[in-house]
Amino acid sequence: MNPRRSASEAHEKIPTLIFDSSASAAASLAREVKELIEAKNREGKAAVLGLATGSTPVPFYRELIRLHREEGLSFANVSSFNLDEYFGLGPDHPESYYRFMCDQLFDHIDIPKANIHLPSGTVASDQVFEHCRQYEEMIDAAGGVDLQILGIGRTGHIGFNEPGSSRESLTRRITLDRITRQDAAADFRGEENVPRFAITMGVGTILRAKKIALMAWGENKAGVVARAVEGEVTDAVSASFLQEHPQSRYLIDQGASRELTRVKLPWLVGPVRWSPQETRRAVCWLSNSLKRPVLKLTDEDYNEHGLSDLLSEQGPAYQLNIRIFNQLQHTLSGWPGGKPNADDTFRPERANPYPKRALVLSPEPQDATVSMGSTLDRLREQGHEVKLVSMTSGSLRVSDAEADKFASILLELGITAPASWKEQTEYAQRILSLLESKGAFGEDPLELRKLKALVLRGELRDSAQALGLPQDRITFMDLPFYEKGRYRRFKLEAEDTAHIVQLLREFQPHQIYITGDAADPSSVSALCFRALKEALKEAPSDGPCSVWLYRGKEKALEPWEIDMAMPISPMQLELKARALTRYTSLTSMELEATKTNQGTAQAYDSLGLANYEAIESFQRWQS
Ligand code: GLP
């Protein structure tokens, strides 16, 4: 399947299909699988599928299940070979890939258990070599993989073929890369719990498949997708080896396409319709690449760097520069809730009403502090009615050590007055024994999960206090989808939206802050945003209500994407850093939040705007 390529795709070395959403990409691939199975059935043969784990294929598996249930697609004549398995995890371990595949696909379709193959995570160390050899043999004996499904890790790995895996590599045991283990940290509640090894099909094994389809969603994958699709074939990005396979292709959504030349620098590969945003992006890009402030760009600069079209349409440079400079300038505002009694023609937020009811939605408890702690502080200080809502409990992020700490203190307190602390002591003992019996990797029983949620509540209260936000401004929503699910496989339901509808009706916000859906569509922040969008349809606000998107764990907004830039002084930045120290469960990326804010300020400075210490940034959501 090699779709005809247009000139704009000239930089791409693998056919790459960009879809509107992961759902539509997944539906198209699922339909292809249906056709494959039916064609094989007609030949009286079994279809052999190579399957992958991770959040990426989840919408694809849901669609296969739907085709099975609603369109009668049978998997009775299908064999499957999974790419990989964590070494050291048995099939019943909640994070084993075997369990993942059963939960996400196998238990919901009619594939015979005997046709399912995954490498074993519990094979004895001295048997690994033989086990891997047999896995290869089994694939060949089945006639080879007809269609291999892949996701891509942030290191560019396919399966678990970490950087350095050769083109010829076969199924083997591999040591996991640090970034891969960081990315799996939330699944295992802490990086230290992530297995160090895995058994994976090799690059050579994967390339033997007759067809290959690699899926990738969200901005976090955009950089590595661009390297794999447009860069050299290199063992530093094992997904780049797909360039050498004649029947391979990438299926990606808008977010994952963002670093491709045709999306990022479209003027280099063809004519462009110069929308205001595209214009702003081109000017910022030019300024960035020439390391020259916007106001110093010349006609020649535009002409010599592929922007002659833009110049002839909107030039001369002097006028274009001033216009874009002013636009950027107008994004800067220390009044996130709007400046009362001021002309707001060029301000990001309207002046009236004042004060505003500002609803700050934090998908997981720490998100808002990490990404907009200083803005929260500013809104409160400027007299707005701030409501900070933690949408999910975040309990899955809290380590066993935190629960252990709490239970141990309680137990010790009990010793001081054994009679009156009887129940509390029993509770503490129960928690400690739950921790011991479930082990480092086990699923948390409900009682433990509740305690972990309370630990995080305490941390959020502490950090809000550091920002001067009173306790009564904080609401804990505990959306059910989170309580019922696990990372990478959450499923939003109507009841989640219902909770938000109620909140909107009660609070009637004038402005809402929330993370958008730029990252993985299965992430907690993307699901919370989707629930808000549904809720806004059901409960539209009476008057105008602006929705401001902030970036959470994802890449920070680029200056050309920013609609409101909130400058932060050195003292305010210190305050935010202090508020962040109240959380024990921040990822390394979240701990860098203040550096990210400084990076945005530097980007504004380089464009020739004021030189601030740091900036928190927001994008206006256009529904
Ligand atoms: C793991 C899996 C890969 C998967 C990758 C990305 O490393 N072994 O097969 O592609 O994670 O995961 P996700 O799809 O959750 O981003």
Image (spheres, rainbow, N blue to C red):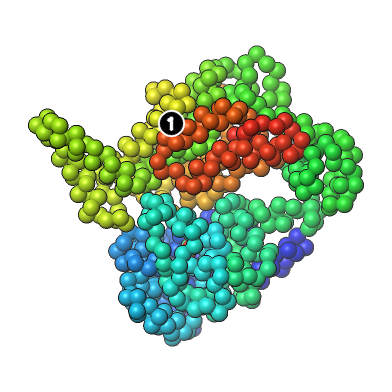
In the figure, residue 351 lies in which quadrant?
Answer: top right
Q: Nearer the viewer, residue 356 or 47?
A: 356
Q: Is residue 280 above or below residue 37?
A: above
Q: Name the spot of residue 175 as percent of width and height, x first.
A: 45, 67
- Residue 131 visible in image: yes
Q: Residue at x 15, y 40 (%)?
A: 426
Q: How many marks overall? A: 1
In the figure, residue 82 lies in which quadrant?
Answer: bottom left
The type of residue carrying mark 1 is Ser
Q: Residue at x 86, y 47 (%)?
A: 302
- Residue 49 visible in image: no
Quadrant of the image for the C terminus?
A: top right
Q: Residue furthest left?
A: 419
Q: Residue at x 44, y 56 (%)?
A: 184
Q: Name the spot of residue 87 as percent of width and height, x first.
A: 38, 68
Quadrant of the image for the N terminus?
A: bottom right
Q: Is residue 203 above or below residue 510?
A: below
Q: Nearer the viewer, residue 97 or 481?
A: 97
Residue that carries the numbered disc 1 in the rendered image: 463
Going by the image, does 516 lie left or right of 259? left
Going by the image, does 324 lie left or right of 213? right
Q: Is residue 508 above or below residue 284?
A: above
Q: Residue furthest top?
A: 341
